[in-house]
Image (spheres, helix red, strand yellow):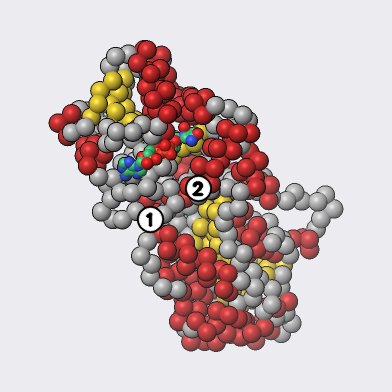
Amino acid sequence: MKILNVDQIRALDQSTIEHEPIAPINLMERAALAFVDWFVDHFPNTTPVKLFCGLGNNGGDGLAIARLLLEREFPIEVYVVRYARRESDDFMHNHRRLKLLTENIRYVEVAQEIPGLRHNELIIDAILGSGLSRPTEGIVKNVIDVINRSPATVVAVDIASGLYVDKPNAPSDTIVEPDYTITFQLPKLAFMLPKNSRYVGDWHIVDIQLHKRYIDLAPTPYYYTQSRDARLLLRKRDKFSNKGSFGHALLMVGSYGKMGAAVLATKACLRSGVGLLTVHVPKCGYDILQIAVPEAMCRPDGNPNVLTGTPDRGASELGSPTPADYAVVGIGSGIGQAPETLDMLKGLLKTLKKPMVIDADALNLLSENRELLKQIPPNSILTPHPKEFERLTQKWDNDYQKLDILREFAQKYRVVVVLKGANSAIATPDGDIHFNSTGNPGLSTGGTGDVLTGVLTALLAQNYDSVEAAVLGVFAHGLAGDRVAAKRGQIGMVATDIIEALRWE
Ligand SMILES: NC(=O)C1=CN([C@@H]2O[C@H](COP(=O)(O)OP(=O)(O)OC[C@H]3O[C@@H](n4cnc5c(N)ncnc54)[C@H](O)[C@@H]3O)[C@@H](O)[C@H]2O)[C@@H](O)CC1
Ligand SMILES: Nc1ncnc2c1ncn2[C@@H]1O[C@H](COP(=O)(O)OP(=O)(O)O)[C@@H](O)[C@H]1O
Ligand SMILES: [K+]
């Protein structure tokens, strides 16, 4: 699903009006109805509602919503925040319609006219929407302050008043902090960014049938991966396939004290459809790995504690192939940052030509030796969490700048970067960013990143293209987390649960 910018959203409304065609007031009615459908599904019509609206089309939506909720017998009070003298045409139209139903519309021009708000009430925020062009001030700011201080449940129409759709707010801006945002047709870029979390709440999209062709043709670097997008990427297995059809992967993982990371990546790789898997671990990890994961082959390193890349003598007598002989190499989980391991990484980057998966300490080694970045095979997948990404690049002032740095990095080094976290952002060598929709804070627990490394390594081994592998793998990993959360809650979730909950269908 695409994420469009504010100018495109405006043009999309216009395109819908012209091409459907539909009168603007009827499009507003459709938006209000979609909001109300969601609202009545979530709240009983015995709850008192206080609706605050502005004077533009977001306010017009609010007035239409008020009328529809009155018709559904909600006890609703309407407050028009009169910050200016000019109302939009469709606001006026809905104002006249609402007045036919009720005389009870109040106007708020000064702070004394702001009503008290109680905890058992619902507040609908329809003051400002995507038309926001400057920070809130005056009476708008006063109203927002009161809303934010109140214990009531707050539902924002389209976007919280005061929040920009696609550019950074100043830290001093006053913005509604809703419990829910019900947004029209498309997700907004602002919703993807960690710092905006309190200005978004739990958000839902409602479909108002905006012009599909406009959306299809609109250029954008931003995408939001939903279930149907991920499903399209998933390949079925051919009836006559064999293990050779799904690639032979090599994981280079683990060190003394961090063999758990190796085991997790290994199990996740096997649970994600790899045909054959060899795992290169320091010698101390040999028994651990063979016992924990009998399905994987093990290549012990000559070094007892860390990876050097040189197989143990016994293992090399088996005639071990070199890393370049495997379909894909996944490296990093629990490897530490020993100088020998750095030398190994340098050697690998010189010889490997196929895309790799690079995680954790392998990324930290690259951060310390940035001259190696340009040797990463094109289309490799890097999976930093924000701290690792900062080490690889630089500090950022805000989430929008972070996205710019992310995009530039992926383009410069021709790699796919999975910046992990809520709504993991996947940057492609072509400059696109795909935000993930699955996952939950239960995943914030040691080892879940190692699981992701295993998943992505398996998908590359199966010949998924790197962008597809990253988008699909991150989605499936988060979805597994959501399955676990539904079954046993977020707090007790551990990385092993994620492996068990992976499903490829
Ligand atoms: N155009 C359409 O056909 C549709 C629009 N819809 C609604 O329309 C909204 C956008 O409406 P508008 O473009 O009228 O804009 P808003 O209703 O967001 O804002 C109204 C006007 O307030 C002014 N303004 C901007 N920042 C301000 C501030 N900080 N303080 C005071 N005034 C400020 C601007 O002149 C702006 O146009 C969407 O968020 C959505 O709710 C929906 O009804 C769907 C269809
Ligand atoms: N709040 C969250 N919401 C969704 N996903 C999360 C959240 N916190 C962490 N995750 C996911 O969990 C994984 C954590 O990876 P990482 O930080 O590398 O952990 P580790 O190094 O311990 O394995 C990533 O896939 C990340 O996207
Ligand atoms: K709003």
The answer to whether one can see residue 304 in this image is no
The CB of the residue at mark 1 lies under 8 Å from ligand 1: no
Q: Looking at the picture, does residue 317 appear above or below residue 377?
A: below
Where residue 354 sits: x, y (%)? 69, 73
Q: Residues within 10 Å of mark 2 (few under 14, many from 20)?
A: few
Residue that label 1 marks: 168
Q: Quadrant of residue 372?
A: bottom right
Where residue 489 sits: x, y (%)? 42, 42
Of badges 1 and 2, nearer the viewer stands 2
The residue at 59%/46% (across/down) is 1
Amino acid carrying label 2: it is Asp
Q: Quadrant of residue 119?
A: top left
Q: CA distance from mark 1 to mark 2?
A: 16 Å
Image check: 394 left or right of 21? Answer: left
Q: Residues within 10 Å of mark 1 (few under 14, many from 20)?
A: some
Give the secondary structure at mark 2. helix
Where residue 214 sits: x, y (%)? 62, 42
The answer to whether one can see residue 464 in this image is yes
The residue at 36%/31% (across/down) is 87
The residue at 46%/74% (across/down) is 392
Q: Earlier in the sequence, mark 1 or mark 2?
A: 2
Q: Nearer the viewer, residue 23 or 392?
A: 23
The residue at 48%/47% (across/down) is 6
Q: Looking at the picture, does residue 235 appear above or below residue 290?
A: above
Q: Looking at the picture, does residue 262 appear above or below residue 470?
A: below
Looking at the image, which residue sits at the far right? 240
Amino acid carrying label 1: it is Pro
Q: Nearer the viewer, residue 11 or 404?
A: 11
Q: Count how many numbered circles sit on residues in the image.
A: 2
Where residue 162 sits: x, y (%)? 33, 44
Residue that label 2 marks: 7
Image check: 435 left or right of 503? Answer: left
